Amino acid sequence: MEPLARSRHCLREPIPEIADAARLLDAAVTAHLLGRRDVAEQLIRLANMPLLREYTESLWGAKSPHLQFRAVAGAPAHLDHESRAKERMPTRAEETVLFKRDGYHCRFCGIPVIRKEIRERIRKVYSDALPWGRKNIEQHAAFQLMWAVPDHVLPHSRGGSSDLQNTVIVCQPCNCARMHYTLEELGLADPRLREPARSSWDGLERFH
Ligand SMILES: [Zn+2]
């Protein structure tokens, strides 16, 4: 197999439409706060772009064309369930620390991300514009793609602990795309060795 480059930050470069969707959602929240619910509703609908769903789906699953890996000598073994760290998800207090440290951008690909709680808050007001069914296809494409999730840098199934040093905030596609592979097996640079991305994007946290 070809040696993989060590410098990549993520498995696939984000497409420009993700930034477009973030701008639409940011403008939607601004419109909402100004009392323009009709405008906010329209902007949330516009952000639900089929291209975003295609992007997310290209990164999900073992058949993803972006999932290239190599065997690495001495790599941590795959652990059975009993041998993995007990706590898998951060507590609410730990999550607060994580977002304070990482901000609202994926630590791998750098795209803007949104917490589930914020999505739920917006959905309470704009349920028609922000569909969220059980199946992937029934979920608003931008909110699905930009969903902020805690991710184990060394995968949980490979012995990764759930402490904050081994956890970073990432987007849903980056989280799922890595599956159970280590950074080295995927040729990914360690996101903890660079500063988190910062911008005026606030994760839509000002929505209320
Ligand atoms: Zn990402």
Image: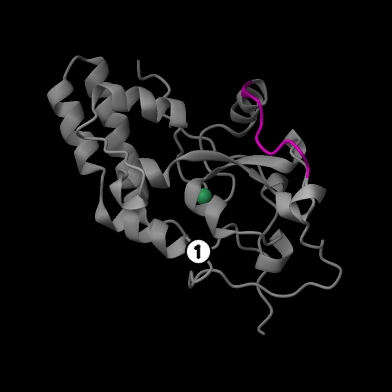
Q: Residue at label 1?
A: 61
The x, y position of residue 106, in whole percent, is 54, 44
Q: Secondary structure at mark 1?
A: loop
Span shown in magenta: 85-92
Vertical placement of 54 versus 168: above or below?
Answer: below
Q: Is 89 covered by the magenta stretch?
A: yes
For the point 56% across and 31% down, the residue is 103
- Which of the two residues, 21 or 162, is positioned nearer the viewer here? 162
Crowding at mark 1 (Cα within 10 Å: few <14, some 14-19, many 20+): some
Please tell me how many numbered marks the rendered image carries: 1
Which colouring convention does the figure follow? one colour
Q: Is 203 covered by the magenta stretch?
A: no
For the point 78% across and 57% down, the residue is 79
- Splitting the image into 4 quarters, where does residue 6 fall? bottom right
Rendered-image quadrant of the N terminus: bottom right
Which amino acid type is marked by label 1? Answer: Gly
User: Of helix, strand and loop, which mostly describes the magenta segment?
Assistant: loop
For the point 26% across and 45% down, the residue is 48
| 102 relative position to 153: left or right | left
The x, y position of residue 189, in whole percent, is 68, 58
Q: Residue furthest front?
A: 82
| 81 relative position to 126: left or right | right
For the point 20% across and 42% down, the residue is 46
- Which of the two residues, 128 or 39, is positioned nearer the viewer here? 128
- Which of the two residues, 195 or 146, is positioned nearer the viewer here? 146
Asked if ligand 1 lies within 8 A of label 1, the reply is no
Rendered-image quadrant of the C terminus: top left
Q: Is residue 119 visible?
A: yes
Q: Is residue 109 visible?
A: no
| 185 relative position to 32: left or right | right
- Splitting the image into 4 quarters, where does residue 149 fall? top right
The x, y position of residue 186, in whole percent, is 65, 66
